[in-house]
Image: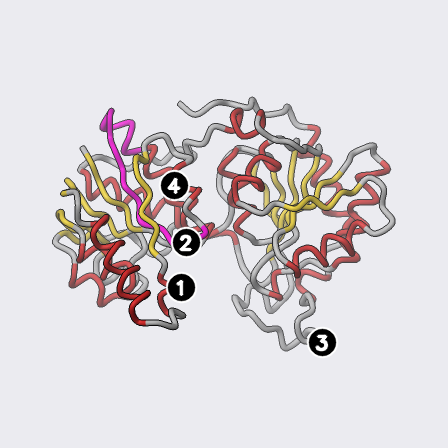
Amino acid sequence: MRILIVKTSSIGDVIHTLPAVTDAARVFPGLACDWVVETGLQEIPGWHPAVDRTLVVGLREWRRQPRRAGLTAGVRGFLTALRDRRYDAVIDAQGLYKSAVIALAARGARHGLDFASAREPAVAATYRRRHRVPRDRHAIARVRALFAGALGYSAPDDLPDYGLDRAAFAAAAEISEPLVFLHGTSWPTKLWPVARWRALARLAGEAGLRVGLPWHGAEDRARAMAIADGLPAVRPIETPTLGDAARLIAAARAAVAVDTGLGHLAAALGVPALSLYGPTAPDLVGTCGAHQEHVVSARFCAPCRSRSCPYADVAQTPPPCLADMAEEAVWRRLQALIAAPAPAIRAAQ
């Protein structure tokens, strides 16, 4: 059986789809998957052993394409690759207009969420088969249920298996530290204050633990340098690619994360992690898996699910819902996570 998966972005959403691929591969030995994903995320699908081919769609680049000839060539090349195979099933796991258009261009029976389940309900009209999945379930459970409905088996309700080989990632790590702090995120309201990170790093250093700070891009680098300044046990580490970040995380004993895609990567790799939630909540899109714990703000306005905070003293600074999370409380939770029996670094099955 060969299927096409349309799940183009973001890091967390793409990672959330991996357990559904594992489920399907267990039901259909020899399953081969092609996966459509945005530029910059193409490493992730290929980490799963059931994914045979990754089709990179440059939607963001095409929107910025200054010359129509370049745009036409890019679209034509993608469509040629997309249509050179017929699929037993085409599963739109995104449920958006952009993903529905891609699914329409593919050759095979189209499956997706029904009108009541999709994020953009009108896209359901483009599918040959529509599947109802309650919207109040975690994103991972929703995708697993969609795959099960599309391919005709019962959706498992056990902990997700992302299908990643942590042992291989860890063995390939050029740099490793016992702890990694995943401090970067796309929303300013999801940031934990630099002062809190520094205080947590001091506590870790006093306990004899080193800390790695992965960074990618100028803003991440500036934050990592500010956290590490004057702390000998803390090391900023450039991770130019997602693969670099995955290797660093896989080799760590534990991680602390804000609500960020790399936090989901830690969960997918089976690395014990403590994730901090202020303006967002973990119930529907939080990290999920063994050895994953959450610190959730109890502030009256949380979760607001907003990129801006009316209660922050200055725009673009961490909001009170996260600033109020004391490093001592986070450290106690992290100590308990570290003290628990270390999970086996298991190779993917």
Query: Which type of secondary structure does the marked residue at label 2 adopt?
Result: loop
If you read the primary sequence from the N terminus, does the residue marked by circle 1 or circle 4 appear first? 4
User: Considering depth in this image, is 149 or 99 the residue closer to the camera?
Assistant: 99
The type of residue carrying mark 4 is Pro
Q: Give coordinates of residue 339: x percent, y percent.
A: 70, 28
Numbered tag placed on residue 39 in the rendering: 2
Numbered tag placed on residue 45 in the rendering: 4
Circles 2 and 1 in contact, beta carbons < 8 Å: yes
Q: Give coordinates of residue 236: x percent, y percent.
A: 73, 46
Query: Which type of secondary structure does the marked residue at label 1 adopt?
Result: helix
Query: Around disc 2, counting alpha carbons within 10 Å, would you say few (fewer than 14), some (14 to 19), or many (20 or more)?
Result: some
Residue at mark 1 to residue at mark 3: CA–CA distance: 33 Å
Camera-near label (3 vs 2) is: 2
Residue at mark 4 to residue at mark 3: CA–CA distance: 39 Å
Query: Which type of secondary structure does the marked residue at label 3 adopt?
Result: loop
Q: Residue at x 33, y 48 (%)?
A: 142
The residue that label 3 is drawn on is 314
Query: Around disc 3, counting alpha carbons within 10 Å, would you say few (fewer than 14), some (14 to 19), or many (20 or more)?
Result: few
Query: Around disc 4, counting alpha carbons within 10 Å, would you say few (fewer than 14), some (14 to 19), or many (20 or more)?
Result: many
The type of residue carrying mark 1 is Glu
Q: Which residue is drawn at 19% across and 43% down?
A: 150
If you read the primary sequence from the N terminus, does the residue marked by circle 2 or circle 1 appear first? 2
The residue that label 1 is drawn on is 61
User: Considering depth in this image, is 261 or 80 the residue closer to the camera?
Assistant: 80
